[in-house]
């Protein structure tokens, strides 16, 4: 399993490096989506500081979901996905590698960029730290669940919208605890409960989501 | 297996289930009507006025049975979809598809009646507390299941994908059920438990349980009717479903179903 994981992970990063613009699109979407909220809600700083964790988290969620719908599409289109599955490489390893590469290419840049937006919303330093930490724990969950959605909707007409309808309800706990952690820190309370639950969610998803994704890949290609 | 007169999988054949369901649906409708009449009469005319809420509480005779049905039907849908996947039994998957719209309807009914109850008692149509939000997520899960099975054209692939989605989503049902215990919420806690005596008046409890059975009978009637429709649609190539019998092919002749 580790052989397939490492090879596929490296391959995905190499392919993304050759198309750097495509790889940075989710980050651009993230910035655009965040910028929309102050324009729509109004520039009142107190309001923005309060809703900033939610804005950043929801934008991260949408950026992850939109970018993940193409996770398997390119490989499916040129036939390499079926070759991977036929070659008796572990399906679970493939699912895990795809989710991991998606996180490194999308989730990790979002997590690194988030403090900048935190400053733009005039968030306090502890709150920005909590935001980055919650995204660090939460974006892998989004990538794992997104991979499941991508495998389920492989080749279907509905595309990204169908994936969002399917997967966003499952991502809601990560959103609640992630944004809630930052809100707790902002209010001066301890966010340990939130981070514990986020960590538990990450472990739970990391263990079970590749299994479900492997089953979905089998359904989609048999 | 040969000595046992009844096979467990006897009604897994779509044609046999079609006939059985056809006989059972009127029975379920009759039961649903009788039980609903009894339950609503008891709830609206026999149950006492509530000490704190007056007569406004009487919506629980719709709200609570609908909420219970929404959760039970989701689990039933996930169960039959899983059976259809594991045993490659297409009828089980058809039943799961038939359950989904009814389950979604009950979820919507629970949310709607909850809002109608919340406005006079809490002062708000909606609050974003744990139980209401997770019941709303249940509605989205039903929508997701219906979306994925209708998005895939090939029927067995759709059945299996739907089964996976339903199973993954069934994690939400315990969250809804236990949400009032795990979080401080505005929603009422559980007044009926399997281990303690109920904290509500006996007549209220009786009316609620009768309404639950009424909704259950209704759900059976509607789900079986819908399953029959799905069976006819999926099995339309079969002779028992009315497809014309194929004449043996002879050179120079066309079959009965080909028109010129």
Image (cartoon, coloured by chain):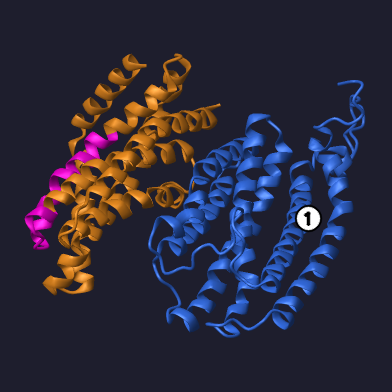
Quarter location, residue B84: top right
| Residue position marked by numbered label 1 in the rendering | B225
Residue shown at 9% from the left, 60% from the top:
A120
In the rendered view, would you say A100 is above or below A195?
A: above
Q: Is B10 on the left-hand or right-hand side of B132?
A: right
Residue at the front extreme?
B197
- Residue A119 position within the rendered picture, expressed as x and y whole percent measured from the top left: 8, 57
What secondary structure characterizes most of the magenta part? helix
**What color is chain A drawn in?**
orange
- Pointer 1: residues within 10 angstroms few (<14), some, or many (20+)? some
Q: Is B243 on the left-hand or right-hand side of A31?
A: right
- In-front residue for pair A75/A5: A5
Chain the render paints blue: B
In which quadrant of the rendered image does the N terminus of chain B lie? top right
Residue shown at 29% from the left, 38% from the top:
A140
- Residue A102 position within the rendered picture, expressed as x and y whole percent measured from the top left: 28, 35
In which quadrant of the rendered image does the C terminus of chain B lie? top right
Residue A112: in magenta span: yes
Residue shown at 58% from the left, 54% from the top:
B71
Residue range of the region highlighted in magenta in the rendering = A102-127
Residue B132, can we see it?
yes
Q: Is B123 on the left-hand or right-hand side of A35?
A: right
Mark 1 secondary-structure assignment: helix
The number of discs equals: 1
- Residue B59 position within the rendered picture, expressed as x and y whole percent measured from the top left: 61, 76
Q: Is B167 on the left-hand or right-hand side of B248?
A: left
Residue A32, can we see it?
no
- Residue B25 position within the rendered picture, expressed as x and y whole percent measured from the top left: 84, 56
Chain under disc 1: B
In the rendered view, would you say B135 is above or below A209?
A: below
In the rendered view, would you say A130 is above or below A91?
A: below
């Amino acid at each position: 399993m580790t052989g397939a994981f490492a090879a596929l992970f490296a391959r995905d990063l190499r392919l993304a490096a050759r198309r750097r613009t495509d790889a940075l699109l989710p980050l651009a979407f993230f910035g655009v989506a965040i910028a929309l909220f102050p324009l729509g809600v109004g520039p009142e700083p107190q309001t923005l500081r309060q809703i900033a964790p939610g804005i950043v988290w929801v934008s991260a969620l949408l950026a992850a979901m939109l970018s993940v719908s193409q996770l398997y599409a390119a490989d499916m289109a040129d036939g390499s996905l079926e070759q991977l599955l036929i070659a008796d490489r572990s399906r679970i390893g493939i699912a895990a590698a795809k989710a991991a590469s998606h996180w490194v290419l999308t989730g990790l840049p979002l997590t690194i960029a988030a403090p900048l937006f935190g400053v733009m919303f005039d968030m306090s330093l502890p709150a920005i730290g909590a935001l980055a930490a919650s995204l660090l724990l939460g974006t892998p969950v989004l990538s794992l669940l997104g991979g499941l959605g991508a495998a389920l909707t492989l080749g279907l007409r509905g595309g990204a919208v169908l994936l969002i309808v399917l997967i966003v309800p499952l991502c809601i706990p990560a959103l609640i605890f992630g944004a809630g952690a930052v809100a707790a820190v902002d209010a001066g309370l301890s966010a340990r409960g939130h981070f514990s639950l986020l960590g538990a969610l990450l472990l739970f998803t990391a263990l079970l989501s590749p299994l479900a994704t492997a089953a979905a890949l089998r359904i989609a290609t048999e | 297996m040969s000595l046992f007169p009844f096979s467990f999988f006897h009604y897994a054949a779509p044609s046999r289930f079609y006939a059985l369901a056809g006989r059972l649906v009127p029975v379920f409708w009759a039961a649903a009507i009788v039980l609903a009449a009894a339950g609503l009469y008891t709830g609206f005319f026999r149950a006492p006025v509530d000490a704190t809420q007056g007569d406004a509480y009487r919506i629980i005779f719709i709200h609570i049975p609908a909420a219970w049905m929404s959760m039970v039907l989701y689990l039933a849908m996930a169960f039959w979809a899983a059976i259809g996947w594991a045993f490659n039994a297409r009828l089980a998957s058809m039943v799961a598809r038939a359950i989904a719209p009814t389950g979604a309807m009950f979820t919507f009914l629970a949310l709607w009646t909850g809002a109608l109850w919340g406005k006079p008692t809490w002062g708000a149509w909606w609050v974003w507390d744990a139980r209401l939000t997770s019941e709303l997520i249940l509605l989205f899960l039903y929508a997701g299941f219906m979306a994925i099975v209708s998005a895939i054209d090939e029927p067995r692939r759709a059945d299996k994908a739907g089964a996976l989605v339903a199973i993954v989503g069934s994690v939400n049902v315990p969250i809804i059920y236990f949400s009032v215990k795990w979080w401080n919420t505005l929603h009422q806690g559980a007044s009926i438990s399997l281990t303690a005596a109920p904290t509500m008046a006996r007549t209220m409890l009786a009316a609620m349980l009768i309404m639950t059975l009424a909704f259950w009978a209704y759900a059976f009637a509607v789900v079986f009717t819908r399953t029959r429709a799905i069976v006819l649609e999926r099995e339309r190539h079969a002779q028992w479903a009315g497809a014309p019998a194929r004449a043996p092919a002879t050179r120079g002749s066309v079959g009965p179903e080909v028109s010129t």
